[in-house]
Image (tube, grey):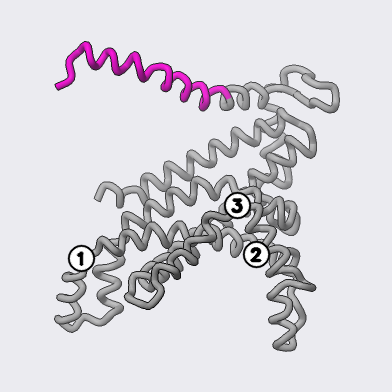
Amino acid sequence: MATQHSRSAARIMMAPAVVLLLGWMLVPLIMTLYFSFRNYLPMRGGDLGWAGFDNYARFVTSSAFWPSIFTTLIIVGSVLAITVVLGVLLAILLNQPMWGRGFVRILVIAPFFVMPTVSALVWKNMFMDPNYGLFAYLWKFFGAAPVEWLSQASLPSIVIIVSWQWLPFATLILLTAIQSLDSEQLEAAEMDGAPATKRFAFITLPHLGRSITVVILIQTIFLLSIFAEIFVTTGGAFGTKTLSYLIFQRVLESQNIGLGSAGGVYAIILANIVAIFLMRIVGKNLDA
């Protein structure tokens, strides 16, 4: 049993790590807040003084702000829908007894370990290139004109690339959950004459509820800051500019640190709104 002395000693030993962690989180946040109220243009005169809320007003009234918000939400929602649905189907398939199941599982999970920039380059050059990509050859084989994916179907292309990256993560989590399902319960339902669709709807799917919630929460956190895939493939053109990419343009391309910092604060607010929404609506499954 811990005594008062041992508890005090534990607090003293943990204090440096807690202070370091708080500093690691708070310093960037405080600096972002500070610069968001400054006219800081490193390549055009440096720090030009106090700006008040001008940077916030300029960023939110920019013609690119709301389209970037909608693009971000469309990408996040589409990727979540694709990865959860296909993740459930793949998890059920990979749970079936078959020859070479371990090797197939490794192949399915492998894309998750590929860097986002690498996967974006692979998709851009090997699959979606209108002249030499695999899809172009398939289109020509069937007598159709090749599609310029990254300009004619830019947003769906980004969704496909990002979904390819995150599908293994969803599959891995859901496969682990399915393996913990009591097989006797399924066998009893089958002996009672329940068809496969009802066994899935009333036994398998409710059992996966908490795992699906975890997948949605974790993926949403990372997808809100999606950047590398857009930078490599479209460069923010053709309606693929997300909020994080817009901040990048304001900070590095326009060299306006104050305006970009104001955008960063908006991104933090959006992330917190989405997180609170998910925890209230979806996260209830974690308490069930």
Q: Is residue 25 magenta?
A: yes
Q: CA distance from mark 3 to mark 2?
A: 17 Å
Give the crowd class for mark 2: few <14, some 14-19, many >=20 residues within 10 Å. many
Taking the view exactly as shown, the residue that stands out farthest to the right is 44
Amino acid at dot 3 = Met
Relative height, residue 108 to residue 248 (above, below)? below
- The residue where tag 2 is placed is 157
Q: Earlier in the sequence, mark 1 or mark 3?
A: 3
Mark 3 vs mark 2, foreground winner is: 3
Q: CA distance from mark 1 to mark 3?
A: 36 Å
Residue located 18% across and 83% down the image? 193
Residue sitting nearer the eye, 204 or 279: 204
Residue sitting nearer the eye, 89 or 241: 89
Amino acid at dot 2 = Ser
User: Is residue 283 visible in the rendered structure shown here?
Assistant: yes
Residue located 57% across and 55% down the image? 114
- The residue where tag 1 is placed is 182
Instruction: Mark 1 and mark 3 in contact? Answer it, CB < 8 Å.
Output: no
Q: Residue 68, which numbered label?
A: none
Mark 1 vs mark 2, foreground winner is: 1
User: Is residue 81 visible in the rendered structure shown here?
Assistant: no
Q: Earlier in the sequence, mark 3 or mark 2?
A: 3
Residue 134 point in image, percent of width and height: 69, 74
Mark 2: which secondary structure? helix
In the picture, residue 212 is in which quadrant?
A: bottom left
Q: Is residue 154 left or right of residue 270?
A: right
Residue 71 point in image, percent of width and height: 63, 54
Part of the protein shown in magenta: 1-27
Q: Quadrant of the N terminus?
A: top left
Mark 1: which secondary structure? loop
